[in-house]
Image: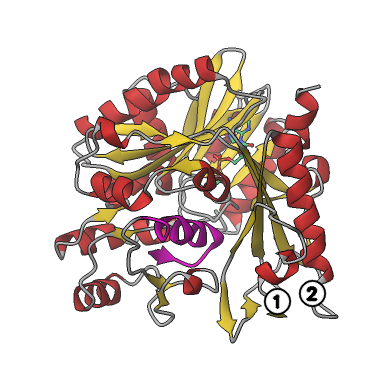
Amino acid sequence: MVGSGAREHALAWKLSQSSPAPELFAAPGNAGTALHGTNWPDVAATSSPQLLKRALENGIELAVIGPEAALAAGVGDALRAGGIPVFGPNRSGARLESSKAYAKQFMLRYGIPTARHRVVRDSRSARRALAQFESGVVVKADGLAAGKGVVVCADAAEAEALLSQWYEQRAVPGGGCDVVLEEKLEGKEVSVMAVVDGVRLFTLAAACDYKRAGDGDSGPNTGGMGAYSPAIDVLDEEGMRQLRSRVFEPALEGLKREGLDYRGCLYAGIMLTKRGPMVLEFNARFGDPETQVVLPRLRGDLVELLRAAAQGKLDDGLHPSFSEQTCVGVVLTSEGYPLHAQPAHNLPPFGEAQAGIEGMPVVAFWGASSLRGDRVDAAGGRVLTVCAFGDGVEEARARAYEACAAYHTSLPSGVALRYRSDIASRASQALH
Ligand code: AMP
Ligand code: GLY
């Protein structure tokens, strides 16, 4: 398992439920992956030579890559070259995420619905192109920018001011010059992930995530403050069928035609507009925090599924199925997130706080952190994703928030974590 976030903890948790249970190693891992295997804290997620060396020394039979930075650094290529089956595309496949301009060209080439766009590379070309985006424009830096590269602008003037600042100060997020300008769309968002083996794919259950820091979608964009699955209020069976035929099937065709041999997760961030579903972005990996609410609902054996994908051997017998229950995940962050990552020390293990609540189906996944005895030192930022099951969204939501409150009261004095109070409330309101 390559990575160190709550997504990787959720993957390790689910992988460890496979039968036979795998022997699991995480590079560098976190306080959560340590509960399911051995961490290699000295091996960075992006260090291909070190990862390959450790993998060969330990007879690793399957590598699962979590973060985009590792994929873009070519960790998939390096491990494959060493003969190790990998779940996670090569660097060439990861361009669907690491270059927004490439992703847009790919979508146009294969008829995947997406917002109208132009690519610019300096203030002059930006000014000229902006004339064509009168009714709102979204500015997207081309490269990987950890969520900081996308700005939704009210009008062309706001976009022009932003772009002049980026270009004058040579401060385009991600460090490149290319910027995608995109027509601003309206609609509800949904995230759908698929497991791809190079020639086939299976979609997983849909989820909705919350990107803004504050309640009511206020405040700055973050890595994700919570999620729920299924996406009950935005996508029904028919909607899901549409996404398969309009987005995932053409995408798979494109991956094959481009000769990418894409083996890993393909994530589509989709806006459901009046003109039909439109792809806002592709990611070349599992979503975070979507994974934390989708995997708990997955029935069946994750090692078997990911190994088959890594080996190019998905077959109908492996078609994933999901529990009818709803899973709601709430992210607890350190103070000041997303502007600073304030470390939080000496946190109690999650289970302790839950001991008093009889049979409560709650699980929590740690972000970047390490174990000290049974206490957790968190690097700060997104500290913990607290996930609860329920028969329906209201029950799951109530349980998740009860667990967050209980955990919060168990924190040592002087430590405070914060979380949004409205995760999945939209879904429960839509049902009334
Ligand atoms: P992205 O990283 O491309 O998914 O963009 C981050 C967020 O910006 C999305 O989740 C949307 O909320 C918003 N966004 C991106 N593209 C558009 C668009 N074309 N129209 C409206 N909002 C968008
Ligand atoms: N939750 C959005 C992402 O993983 O990029």
**Quadrant of the drawing holding the N terminus:** bottom left
Q: Amino acid at mark 2?
A: Leu
Residue 380 at least partly seen: yes
Residue 9 in magenta stretch: yes
Residue at the spot of label 1: 348
Give residue 18's quadrant in the image: bottom left
Residue 411, disc: 2
Of residues 126 and 15, the one drawn nearer to the viewer in this rendering: 15
Give the residue furthest to the bottom.
373
Q: Is residue 241 above or below residue 21?
A: above
Q: Is residue 377 above or below residue 387?
A: below
Image location of residue 182, percent across then percent down: 55, 30
Left/right of residue 339 with respect to residue 189 in the rendered view: right
Q: Nearer the N terminus, badge 1 or badge 2? A: 1
Give residue 61's quadrant in the image: bottom left
Q: Residue at x 39, y 79 (%)?
A: 40
Image location of residue 185, percent across then percent down: 62, 24
Whether the residue under disc 2 has CB within 8 Å of ligand 2? no
Disc 1: CA contacts within 10 A as few (<14), some (14-19) or many (>=20): some
Stretch of the chain drawn in magenta: 1-18
Callout 2 secondary element: loop
Discs 1, 2 touching: Cβ within 8 Å: yes
Residue 213 at least partly seen: no
Image location of residue 313, percent across then percent down: 19, 41
Q: CA distance from mark 1 to mark 2?
A: 7 Å
Q: Is residue 48 above or below residue 97?
A: below
Q: Residue at x 70, y 68 (%)?
A: 340
